[in-house]
Image (tube, rainbow, N blue to C red):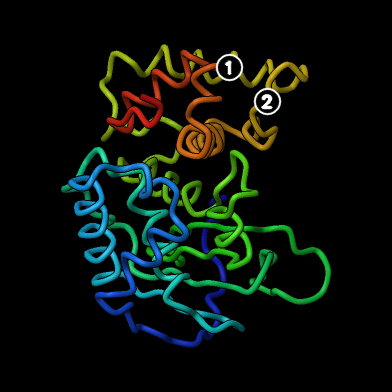
Amino acid sequence: MIILGGYFPLRKRNRNKPSEDAYKVILNEHIEYYQKLDDGGKARFEKLVKEFLNVTHIEGVGTEITDVDRVMVASGAVIPIFGFPSWKYRNLTNVILYPDTFNHEYQFEGGDRNILGMVGSGYMNGQMLLSRAALVKGFSKSSGAENTAIHEFVHLLDMSDGATDGIPQNLMKHEYTIPWLKMIHHEMQRIEAGHSDINPYAVTNEAEFLAVASEYFFQKPGELKQHHPEIYEQLSRIFGQTPEK
């Protein structure tokens, strides 16, 4: 989800990073993507996680932040750009974790709370807000094709060219733009007709389609390749990865 402007709440700062020994333990226990890498890939993933945590503040509002939380956030950032090892999230400075869902006023108690994550622009530029509960669920065995952290970091990648439009021009060749848009609109029609297993939130707009399809791509690559081979192929080009080999 994307939000433009708004009030930024006071927050509890916690900038501690995991110890050197903690990284591998947490990645081996919680990050399935990491577990499937070869030794060289694991070493590179660990390096990128550490680099992300060195430059990004992860803070809590109404919740204490753990080393597992930090590594999960960093993994959500690293997974989409793993095919581009020199990529830096220059449009991000802080990640704010809320205990659970929140609303547009950043309240995490009471009713009308259905937001799992958002990235901001304008007054909120450089900020990402995530539900800690959704973060943890996204890296659990019961997550299915959904991962809120990956979803929001894909929005940041999409934004990096100056437009949040589902076309990450910094990551894809120009000749693929029109075919990708046609593919998006065709699949949106299938979703609306009940003929697709892609999360219906994808029909919100092209940017949300990219983020939702990317969750599916990284969480369940085999299923995406089987059910949506053209979408899988295009996302492989965009991210420079073939998670289902």
Rate crowding at label 2 as few (under 14), some (14 to 19) or many (20 or more) other CA atoms within 10 Å: some
Answer with the quarter of the image where residue 107 lies: bottom right
Left/right of residue 161 with respect to residue 31 in the rendered view: left
- Can you give x and y, in whole percent of width and height, for residue 212 in the image? 56, 37
Whole-Å distance between the Cαs marked 2 and 1?
8 Å
User: Disc 2 designates what residue?
Assistant: 197
Q: Which residue: 42% across, 44% down?
A: 154
The residue tagged with tag 2: helix, strand or loop? loop
Crowd tier of the residue under label 1, counting other residues whose Cα lies within 10 Å: few below 14, some 14–19, many 20 or above:
some
> At which x and y percent is residue 163?
39, 40
Amino acid on which disc 2 is placed: Asp
Q: Which residue is mark 1?
A: 227
Q: Nearer the viewer, residue 149 or 24?
A: 24
From the viewer's perspective, tell me whether residue 116 is left or right of residue 39: right
- x and y percent of residue 179 in the render? 42, 12
Residue 115: x and y in percent read 67, 58
Dots 2, 1 in contact, CB < 8 A = yes
- Residue positioned 43% across, 62% down in the render: 73
Residue drawn where x is 20% and y is 59% of the image = 47
Residue 156 versus residue 77: which sits nearer the camera? Answer: 77
